[in-house]
Amino acid sequence: MNALPGLGRSFSDKDVASFLGVDVRLVRRFAHSLGGIRLGKKYIFFEEALVNAIQRQIGSMDRSGSNQ
């Protein structure tokens, strides 16, 4: 895993799937929503984008829960 300034470490789709406890196919399906990019047949996720995507999802769940 390499670190890039402003992006943090890079992760594969398999790394993200393992971390989230889901199938790699689910990670690939939602790669764009998770801040990932596709380069040819490979998916790459950067730490900062992944954290931001998760925080956005948590924030949207908080907002939707407060309306009930």
Image (cartoon, rainbow, N blue to C red):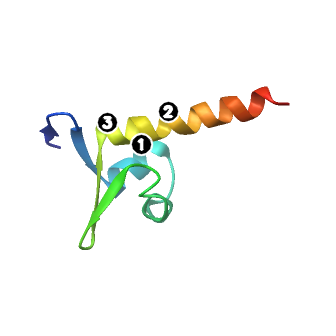
Residue 55 numbered tag: 2
- For badge 3, the amino acid type reads Glu
Q: Is 26 on the left-hand or right-hand side of 14?
A: right
Q: Is 67 on the left-hand or right-hand side of 57?
A: right
Rendered-image quadrant of the N terminus: top left
Residue positioned most to the bottom = 40
Q: Which residue is drawn at 73% across and 35% down?
A: 64
Q: Residue at x 52, y 36 (%)?
A: 56
Residue linked to disc 1: 19
The Cα–Cα distance between marks 3 and 2, rounded to whole angstroms, is 11 Å
Q: Is 30 on the left-hand or right-hand side of 45?
A: right
Rendered-image quadrant of the C terminus: top right
Q: CB under 8 Å between callouts 1 and 2?
A: no
Q: Which of 5 and 42 is in front in this view?
A: 5
- For badge 2, the amino acid type reads Gln
Residue 41: image location, x then y, percent:
27, 73
Residue 48 numbered tag: 3
**Res 37 → quadrant:** bottom left
Does residue 1 sit above or below 66 in this rendering? below
For marks 3 and 2 on the same chain, the one whose residue lies earlier in the sequence: 3
Label 3 secondary element? helix
Q: Which residue is drawn at 48% across and 38% down?
A: 54
For marks 1 and 2 on the same chain, the one whose residue lies earlier in the sequence: 1
Residue 27: image location, x then y, percent:
45, 57
Q: Which one is closest to the eye, mark 1 or mark 2?
A: 2
- For badge 1, the amino acid type reads Phe
Label 2 secondary element? helix
